[in-house]
Amino acid sequence: AVVVGFASPVARLAYAMASGMLPHVKSLVTLGTGCLVGAFGATAMRARERHQCLEAGEFYECGGRYYQAMGHAWDFTRRDFCVVFRPLHHCDAKATAHEAHVLATTDFSDWGTYKRVTFSDLDGLAKAAALPGPFWSDAQWALPGATAAVAADEATTSGLGTRSHQARPTKRSLL
């Protein structure tokens, strides 16, 4: 009979240490695998959430170029609401038209010439430039996010402008 043994006391010690650590190594491998699976799952969910936010965005086309609506803003110069949007392409200055810009505003009469499109309608460069929204946050805001035109025979709450977040203007009963 052949007896298999360790060639040296050092080899015997190494085997004893390895067999004693095996349960701990298994636990660490399990922990590491769990962390990797969890990190992958979280990353996949964030990517899905980002894509859903992109698809929910407001995109428009005008003259073969794509734009993303950011929201409606009060313009103190016009004393009315305007549309804030961003071109989904690089905009250098153009003589007699505009300066180089990354955000722009326009009034609603001009915005009517822009055609609403979906995220899937955008070309590859426009999709890459699109940002997930929403683009503002106010925990106390109770009105709709978008404005609506006010009837010509009715005034806004402030008495200024032609659009409002309110369906009906607020009437102040106490002065």
Image (cartoon, rainbow, N blue to C red):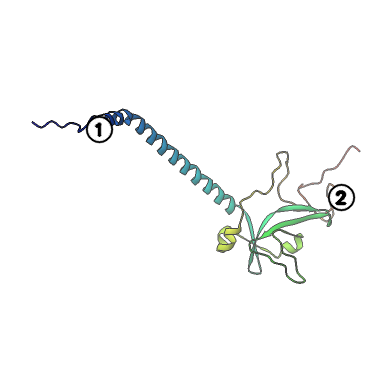
- Relative placement, left or right, of 14 versus 62 is left
In the rendered view, would you say 35 is above or below 151? Answer: above
Residue 142: percent from left, percent from top: 72, 41
The residue shown at (73%, 38%) is: 140
- The residue indicated by pointer 1 is 11
Q: Which mark is residue 117?
A: none
Location of the N terminus (image quadrant): top left
- Relative placement, left or right, of 5 versus 111 is left
- Relative placement, left or right, of 5 versus 24 is left
In the rendered view, would you say 11 is above or below 96? Answer: above
- The residue indicated by pointer 2 is 159
Residue 67: percent from left, percent from top: 65, 61
Quarter of the image where one finds residue 60: bottom right
Q: Secondary structure at mark 2?
A: loop
| Near-viewer residue (20 or 115) | 20
Residue 159: percent from left, percent from top: 86, 50
Quarter of the image where one finds residue 28: top left
The residue shown at (26%, 31%) is: 10
Task: Judge whether residue 122 can be spotted in this image.
Answer: no
| Near-viewer residue (86 or 29) | 29
